[in-house]
Image: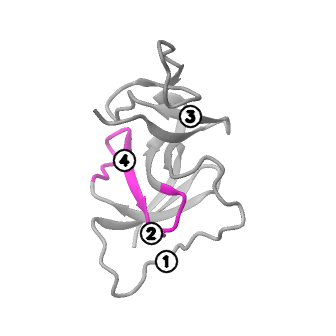
Amino acid sequence: MIGPAKIVVRHVDGTILKGYSQDFSPTAHQFHIRRDAVGGTDPGQRVMMRDLKAIFFVRDFAGNGDYDERKEFVIGKPHSGRKMEVTFTDGEVLVGTTTGYDNERPGFFLFPVDDKSNNTRVYILQAGVRKVKFI
């Protein structure tokens, strides 16, 4: 059995939740987030996908506010998927690759270009996106 995912949930309205989820699915309308990895019988707080900007799958909840994440691809370094730049409605920009982008779907996964990023992958909801550019 796979353990719960460590995630940071960012709502379109700017609200942020940090915790663990074991029932996230890109095809579901909702999932739950708990404060600790071992939730016991507590299902956690319900999160509605329609309210979200993105779900960040993270290495650490604190992150490193001083780290300047690289936004360019390294020449000669192999990557999988299509290179893209995503600009959110709040102005945040992420750069990475995707293997499943379809603007008809509610969301897609992006894998950050910077392998030292705190984010291992990001599920981006179309509702929070201003612009997608393939690079």
Residue at 49 percent of width and 77 percent of height: 72
**Residue under label 4:** 108
Residue at 40 percent of width and 29 percent of height: 22
Locate residue 50, reporting x and y percent: 49, 29
Q: Is residue 65 above or below residue 21?
A: below
Q: Nearer the viewer, residue 77 or 19?
A: 19
Q: Is residue 90 above or below residue 84?
A: above
Locate residue 27, reporting x and y percent: 31, 31
Locate residue 110, reporting x and y percent: 40, 56
Q: Earlier in the sequence, mark 2 or mark 4?
A: 4
Circles 1 and 3 in contact, beta carbons < 8 Å: no
**Residue under label 2:** 113
**Magenta segment range?**
100-119
Q: Secondary structure at mark 4?
A: strand
Q: Secondary structure at mark 2?
A: loop
Camera-nearest label, 3 or 2: 3
Camera-nearest label, 4 or 3: 3
The amino acid type of the residue labelled 3 equals Gly
Q: Secondary structure at mark 3?
A: strand
Residue at 53 percent of width and 19 percent of height: 44
Q: Magenta stretch containing residue 20, yes or no?
A: no
**Residue under label 3:** 19
Locate residue 102, reporting x and y percent: 30, 49
Name the quarter where the C terminus is drawn.
bottom left
Q: Earlier in the sequence, mark 4 or mark 3?
A: 3
**Residue under label 1:** 72
**Residue found at the far bottom of this picture:** 76
Residue 14 location, quadrant: top right
